[in-house]
Image: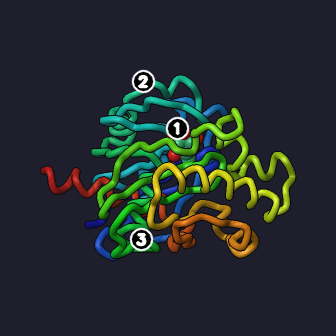
Amino acid sequence: MIILGVDIGGSGIKGAPVDTEKGTMLSDRFRVPTPEGAEPAEVADVVAEVARNFDWKGPIGAGFPAVIQHGVAKTAANVHKSWIGTHAEELFSKSTGCPVRVLNDADAAGMAEMRFGAGRGRNGVVFIITIGTGLGTAVFTNGVLVPNTELGHIEMDGQDAEMQASDAARQRDNLKWAQWGKRFNRYLQRLDALFWPDVFILGGGASKKIDKFLEVLDVHAEIVPAELENEAGIVGAAIAAEALVTAQ
Ligand code: BGC
């Protein structure tokens, strides 16, 4: 199926048509900077701009950095608070004129890794962690997603883990990769002790530097880098929207 995948992030909104059987993008991704403040109406306009850029008339899948239950945003850790309670699917369907499926951004990246990347053929308990502005998590058991796990927000030293172990925290505190890696390791150890996953797949921007911190990570689970890098969010969002087509 050919579906437009859109990845809505804190700094950019990116999209490309995706062949969901092959897991490939059919053109370069089109990127628009996320509008200042990222309020719903403005983001919806940008999603429409992405669709227009590809002259798109078909189904769209969009990953969004919040809990998305039945199309409605329920949290807003790194986006404008007015998203809470906003029906993102209806909003984007209206702005684009296309059927839209919206899901959590880490869940989208996880779906792409499971089908086409580092999670391919993996059974058992698989955790995908996207390390960026936030810490996103996607949990799969025997290939089935448990949606909307918000494990970037577990408590660590009396604080939200994301405030210490995200890539934004590394930049904010001006840490070397190994220094940040030690913090991130404490975060992984918490998840490891609570959930005993078979494998952690590390994705997001920081995963490109995994060679600089892999050796300080010490958990029972296997650790592997994500394979789809930048494209996972777009490809996974498109995969999630396949259901729009099969439901017709
Ligand atoms: C949000 C998650 C999101 C993650 C990555 C967190 O702050 O709560 O919903 O998946 O950031 O963007």
Contact check, label 1 and label 2, Cβ < 8 Å: no
Between 126 and 208, the one nearer to me in the picture: 126
Front residue of this view, candidates 200 and 88: 200
Residue type at mark 3 is Gly
Q: Answer above or below: position of 174 versus 94.
A: below
Q: Residue at point 31% right, 41% down?
A: 97
Q: Which mark is residue 119?
A: 3
Q: Which residue does the numbered mark 2 point to in the structure image?
A: 85
Of residues 144 and 218, the one nearer the viewer is 218
> Marks 1 and 2, Cα distance to the nearest angstrom?
15 Å
Task: Give the residue drawn at x 43%, y 67%.
Answer: 113
Report the mark closest to the observer, 3 or 2.
3
Question: Which residue corresponds to the image point at 69% horizontal and 33% vertical from the top-left?
Answer: 158
Q: Can residue 48 be seen in this snapshot?
A: no
| Location of mark 1 (residue) | 43
Count residues near mark 2 (Cα–Cα under 10 Å), then give few for <14, some for 14-19, many for 20+. some
